Image: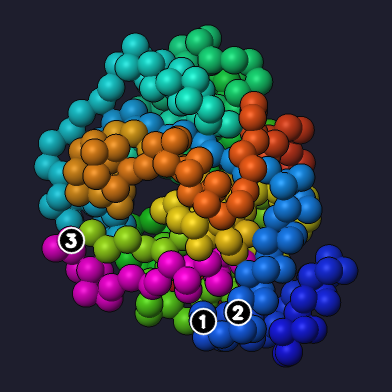
């Protein structure tokens, strides 16, 4: 498929097939064709967001060796990066949330490891909700949940969740893809917005795998989607594969934006970078505390970016920053059944 045909379809808001996505992903990242896709994705992102990028602030409620053993994650018990556990108290959680809000973050996220107690997360959510503005979205980045648990999260004040069916799910961790699918259904049924991403992308992943997962995320009609490369955690099994370039990631971010329904406003990438923003990324995360891509307990002292740096990166890519609450969670989500598990993650 010629790049001009791809752009024409994008202009008309038409959907793309698996083969068409593979074609777009197959261009060399530094080719004129790939640059044309970046430009078109940027145009679409500006169209659906009104030209406004967003910065969301995420802080960790805990750090613990995790028995799910995602090989790409520094929390994985098998990776032996972190051997001790800690949890922050409600006062510190409120302080982090309020600070993000004051710095201009458009939404606040709490991140937990998979075994963090639900009752404690709900308690934290209620306390945070009491102190932040009513229209500031509160989002959870947490483990798999039942429908009843998802409904409790909604009642506690969460507006949405970040949850992804990752590349190599069930092969490079102890999480069955079906469990991730069931959880996404549960969150949607409970009235929580689901944001997702095509991740964690490594050099070994094929264009076919990426295209399958892009189509899967499009079928969710998420609040936001996007793409993120795998950050090699030092001295772990997957570190030997290395990392894709920012330019390649920007290409995947662009193709993901073109494949998403126009109702999906957000297009994320991580970690924050100007090339991602050039390719149509409109959502970065600022981070505090534990980070699954970092081998330091306080990522703000190492890999993590703050709101100010994220703002600078967007500004360098000529994006305006939204002031006020996120646009991605402004109406009640419609429950949607996820599409069939893509071969990229199916066991």
Q: In x, y percent, where is residue 207?
A: 53, 81
Name the residue: 24% across, 38% down.
301
Name the residue: 68% across, 65% down.
41
Asked if residue 18 is positioned above or below residue 290 in the image, the reply reads below
Residue found at the far right of this picture: 12
Main SS category, magenta section: helix
User: Mark 2 sits on what residue?
Assistant: 34
Considering depth in this image, is 322 or 143 the residue closer to the camera?
322
Q: Is residue 223 visible?
A: no
User: Mark 1 sits on what residue?
Assistant: 30
Q: Residues within 10 Å of mark 2 (few under 14, many from 20)?
A: many
Q: In x, y percent, where is residue 225?
A: 60, 54
Q: Is residue 247 magenta?
A: yes
Residue 284 located left or right of residue 332: left
Residue 198 located left or right of residue 53: left
* Mark 1–mark 2 CB contact (< 8 Å): yes
Residue 234, label in figure: 3
Name the residue: 32% across, 66% down.
172
Name the residue: 47% across, 81% down.
206
Q: Is residue 61 magenta?
A: no
Q: In x, y percent, where is residue 277?
A: 56, 56
Cα separation between marks 3 and 2:
31 Å
Which stretch did the figure color magenta?
A: 234-255
Q: Nearer the viewer, mark 3 or mark 1?
A: 1
């Amino acid at each position: 498929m010629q790049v001009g045909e791809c752009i024409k379809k994008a202009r008309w808001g038409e959907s793309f097939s698996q083969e068409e996505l593979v074609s777009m992903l197959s261009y060399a990242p530094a080719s004129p064709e790939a640059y044309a896709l970046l430009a078109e994705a940027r145009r679409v992102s500006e169209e659906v967001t009104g030209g406004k990028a967003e910065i969301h602030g995420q802080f960790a409620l805990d750090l613990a060796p995790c028995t799910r053993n995602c090989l790409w994650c520094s929390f994985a018990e098998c990776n032996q990066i972190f051997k001790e556990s800690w949890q922050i108290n409600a006062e510190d959680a409120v302080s982090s949330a309020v600070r993000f809000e004051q710095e201009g973050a458009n939404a606040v996220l709490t991140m937990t490891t998979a075994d963090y107690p639900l009752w404690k997360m709900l308690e934290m959510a209620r306390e945070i909700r009491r102190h932040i503005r009513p229209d500031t979205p509160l989002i959870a980045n947490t483990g798999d949940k039942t429908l009843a648990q998802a409904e409790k999260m909604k009642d506690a004040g969460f507006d949405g969740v970040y949850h992804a069916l990752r590349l190599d799910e069930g092969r490079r961790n102890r999480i069955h893809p079906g469990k991730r699918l069931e959880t996404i259904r549960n969150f949607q049924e409970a009235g929580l917005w689901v944001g997702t991403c095509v991740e964690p992308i490594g050099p070994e992943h094929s264009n076919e795998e990426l295209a399958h997962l892009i189509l899967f995320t499009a079928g969710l009609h998420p609040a936001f989607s996007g793409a993120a490369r795998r950050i090699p955690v030092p001295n772990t099994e997957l570190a030997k594969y290395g990392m894709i370039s920012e330019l390649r990631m920007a290409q995947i971010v662009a193709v993901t934006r073109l494949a998403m329904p126009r109702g999906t406003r957000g297009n994320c990438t991580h970690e924050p970078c100007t090339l991602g923003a050039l390719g149509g990324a409109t959502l970065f995360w600022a981070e505090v505390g534990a980070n699954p891509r970092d081998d330091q307990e306080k990522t703000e002292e190492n890999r993590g970016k703050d709101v100010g740096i994220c703002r600078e990166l967007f500004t360098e890519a000529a994006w305006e920053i939204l002031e006020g609450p996120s646009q991605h969670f402004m109406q009640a989500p419609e429950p949607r059944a996820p599409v069939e598990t893509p071969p990229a993650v199916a066991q």
